[in-house]
Image (tube, grey):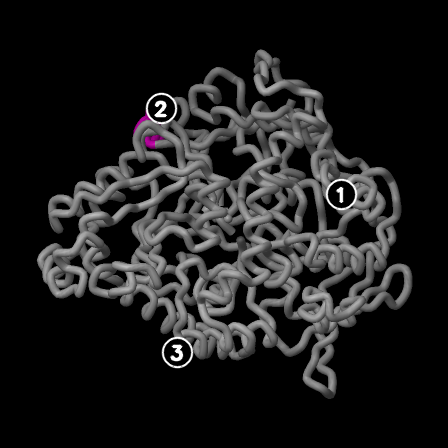
Amino acid sequence: MRASQIWNATGSSWKRAILLVSLALVAAALLAACGGDESSDRVDQQQAASRTDRAESQAEQQQESRADRQATIQQQQQQAQGQEQQVEVRPVQPREAGEFRIARSEPINLDPAQITDVSSAVIAVEIFGGLLVLDRSLRIAPDLAESVPTGQLNSDGTVTYRFTIRDNARFHDGKRITAEDFKWSIERNLRPETLSPTAPDFLGDIVGASEFLRNRADEVVGVQVIDEVTLDITIKQQTPVFLYKLTYPTAFVLDRDQVEDDPERWALAPNGSGPFRLTEWQLGEGLTLERFDDYHLEPAKVRKVSVRFAGGSVEQFENDELDQAFIGLNDIERVRDPASDLNPLYVSRSELSVFYLAFNVTQPPFDDPNVRLALAHAIDKTTIVEDVLDDLLLAAHQIVPPGLVAHDADYRGLVFDPEFAQELLAESRYAGTTFIDEIRLTIPGAGATPGSVFEAIQDMWRQHLGLEIEIQQVEFATFISEVDRGLYGFFSLGWSLDYPDPHNVLDYKFHSASLGNDTQLDSEEIDSLLERARYSLDHELRTGLYQDVDRMLVEDAIWIPLYYSVAHEVVKPYVQDYEPTRMVIPHLRFVSIEE
């Protein structure tokens, strides 16, 4: 998932994603799209089609239409709420009893079928629910289902999971949630007209999903309602990640009546099933989540969560405007000081996300590995992390982040070697051409400067390679749309994992048939390794395969991993049971306020 915010080392706060990404830079765009694999039909089609043909495929149409929806979301909000373009920010009110005040980025879209960025996902997971959920230890746990099922292997190689919906499962308006609601939601998200950028990947394992997506079937035959509370989901073959995929928003249950009554604007005030109800959304200002007292699991301990879109700084925390805040470069030294009043309130935790530079390997000069490798070897990540970022983040030498078994802590990746970088650039077939002189790095953002990290990298390329590389900033929604359409040759993103498995980043971002393959990589060798890992139940084998793929990608400089995200936060002493999450999961219901 693309992360929601780019790390700006000159800023006062770190608004975490995690794009992821999108979650993460902008979204990467954490947050950003999220992991998954394609159906065998799509793989076959992809292998038979050229890159040019694929650019005109339904997948791209989905991406373009999603961009249109993202571009109009503010207009829809204004229409729904009767607001003008100028939003008057209301003065900060004292904290109410049972209120938890936080700052996050404004969601782009709360339709679970459309979510690809962390800023949207962190709110959506509190409003909606699915059959399964990731708990705070990142284990698969039952949500609206009574239990986590064990798959039944069928004679034709398919696997069936039987889910029983909880008796007390309710939408926020009190309406009973049934197995039929889940079947309708899955099929709605897979319909071509829904234009979901994630449903083909997260739901594509289900028997009949690809046929339904292409309008070749009237239903998804792999989703069968047995009775009011019993649902069978059958997938095409065994895979260790399918149940993980059901924890992602694309698999959340929706209120059919609400969606069909107002298909364009229902997500501005959704009738969800999660621990909180969205009761107010002030454009550009904030939103309010109120406890759903009839939540099927233990109801939230706080009465409401007030989310501000602006700020999130330590200064606001110190002024008692926020109960939790993220710590940025300007404040980290002070907060780490044992003598500081803030130090006892400081918490830190690594996240399952990675920030990186990426290349579209079909565009010159980036179709030459020597160019990519030269740019990679000219970056001193140690200096960036230690001197520019004051150790706020962890230097990344591979793609899979720490915390997953496939992460190899001893692997050093591409080391900083400016002399070797110069040799590689000189050996490139583009040496001395305008392609080299006109390299541009595109990043999400709209600041006066691109930030200290990118300025430092820009200076390293200037010093070690003699290159004046332009850094172009593009507004987030436009940036994501144009990355998805393959319009940038060199760009920067962040990726926040949607579930704790390397499949979610390596398969989704680099398999040639994946919708998330924005590098346009087309490698038979990598595809073969990823497909073996995708369906293998041998944990040790999968780990080895993913480590091999990771190294191949790094050593060919398809991505240049820069750093892994770490959450640095301060939390008021009266806030109980709050802890930073390693990825996007519902967690606000566990928080309590000691009055």
Range shown magenta: 329-340
Q: Position of residue 585 (x, y in %)?
A: 59, 48
Q: Position of residue 236 (x, y in %)?
A: 67, 77
Q: CA distance from mark 3 to mark 2?
A: 53 Å
On the question of residue 410 being in view, the answer is no
Going by the numbered disc 2, the residue's amino acid type is: Ser
Going by the numbered disc 1, the residue's amino acid type is: Pro
Q: Which residue is mark 2?
A: 340
- The residue at the point 75 percent across, 55 percent down is 188
Dot 2 or dot 1: first in sequence order is 1
Above or below — where is 294 with respect to 483?
Answer: above
Q: Which residue is mark 3?
A: 525
Let me know if residue 167 is in the magenta part.
no
Dominant secondary structure (helix, strand or loop) of the stretch shown in magenta = helix
Q: Which residue is mark 1?
A: 263
Above or below — where is 95 with respect to 35?
Answer: above
Going by the numbered disc 3, the residue's amino acid type is: Glu
- The residue at the point 48 percent across, 41 percent down is 478
- The residue at the point 66 percent across, 51 percent down is 113
In this view, the residue in front, 79 or 94, is 79
- The residue at the point 55 percent across, 77 percent down is 44
Q: Secondary structure at mark 3?
A: helix
